[in-house]
Image: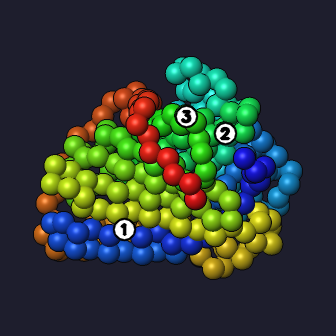
Amino acid sequence: MKAMKPAIYSGKVTHSRIRPRTHFLSYNVFSLLLDVNNLHSLNVNYKLLSYNRFNLFSIFDKDHGNQKNIKEWVVSELRNIGEDDSTHQIFMLCYPRILGYVFNPLTVFYCYRKSGSLGALIYEVHNTWGERHSYIMIVENQNGNIISHSCKKKFYVSPFVQESCLYKFKIRLPDDKVIIIIDESDENGPFLNATFEGSRTQLSDKHLVKMFFLYPLMTIKIIVGIHYEAVKLFAKRFPIYKHIPKLEENTRTIKVIKDPKINRERN
């Protein structure tokens, strides 16, 4: 594995629905790739990006995991499933708070072993009801930087998607580009494709200023965009699935997936 460094990944999020009716959306966004083991260094290395402090851009523990220290949360969850060695280096790909506000539909944690191989991926999903849920995918015998795997959906995300579905992930590990592809299917086959593809830029105050003006108030636009697209889906008469609130302790339960048939392919 090449040495990973904090970075900005700017690109597009797209969603494409093929059933029960077609629907497509595309938004320009950027994400930050950050070293979870050294989040405190953000307060020293950057003027415009802070950890647990208000700033133009910021990262807060309370936005992830179970609201304890982000590193402690990731490490404890990996150790709970016997993946102690996957805590050597941990990076997170997420949206930052911008002027104090953020909504992260998906945060990805890349968890590496001492050998440099990827040990686990954690997908942390948020919904607009203030709930969060995480999936851990164990990675064995990594070969190349493209990883594919699947798991059952366990968490209510959208009123226009039923909960009994299957996720298929295809991930390109962060280098000059990062790619996250999620295909969702039900008993009738695939119906939704969600993709983020971004290009790498050095993380610096100069480039953060550039992101602020290229993507003004991006995190607010994300939550506005979610509701705007919901109105359009409602107008198209998409079926609506009722949200049933879950107990707080259940919304943060980690689901462990150890799939011996994980697909791997070279880049």
* Residue 260 placement, left or right of 10: left
Residue 200: image location, x then y, percent: 68, 67
Looking at the image, the residue that sits furthest to the right is 44
Locate the C terminus by quadrant: bottom right
Residue 227: image location, x then y, percent: 33, 66
Looking at the image, the residue that sits furthest to the bottom is 214
Residue 210, label in figure: none
Hey, what amino acid is under mark 3?
A: Glu
Hey, what amino acid is under mark 2?
A: Ser
* Residue 114 placement, left or right of 129: right
Is residue 67 depicted above or below 150 in this figure? Answer: above
Q: Between disc 2 and disc 3, whose residue precedes?
A: 2
> Which residue has dot 1 on it?
15
> Which residue has dot 3 on it?
140
* Residue 125 placement, left or right of 75: left
In this figure, what is the number of numbered marks?
A: 3
User: Could you classify mark 2 by the number of other residues whose Cα lies within 10 Å: few (under 14), some (14-19), or many (20 or more)?
Assistant: many
Q: Between disc 2 and disc 1, whose residue precedes?
A: 1
* Residue 13 placement, left or right of 1: left
Question: Which quadrant holds residue 100?
Answer: bottom right
Residue name at image x 60 percent, y 45 percent? 143
Q: CA distance from mark 2 to mark 3?
A: 9 Å
> Which residue has dot 2 on it?
117
Residue name at image x 22 percent, y 43 percent? 164
Q: Nearer the viewer, mark 2 or mark 1?
A: 2
Q: Nearer the viewer, residue 184 or 236?
A: 184
Q: CA distance from mark 2 to mark 1?
A: 30 Å
Hey, what amino acid is under mark 1?
A: His
Q: How is the image coloured?
A: rainbow
Is residue 51 depicted above or below 182 in this figure? Answer: above
Residue name at image x 38 percent, y 44 percent? 150
Q: CA distance from mark 1 to mark 3?
A: 30 Å
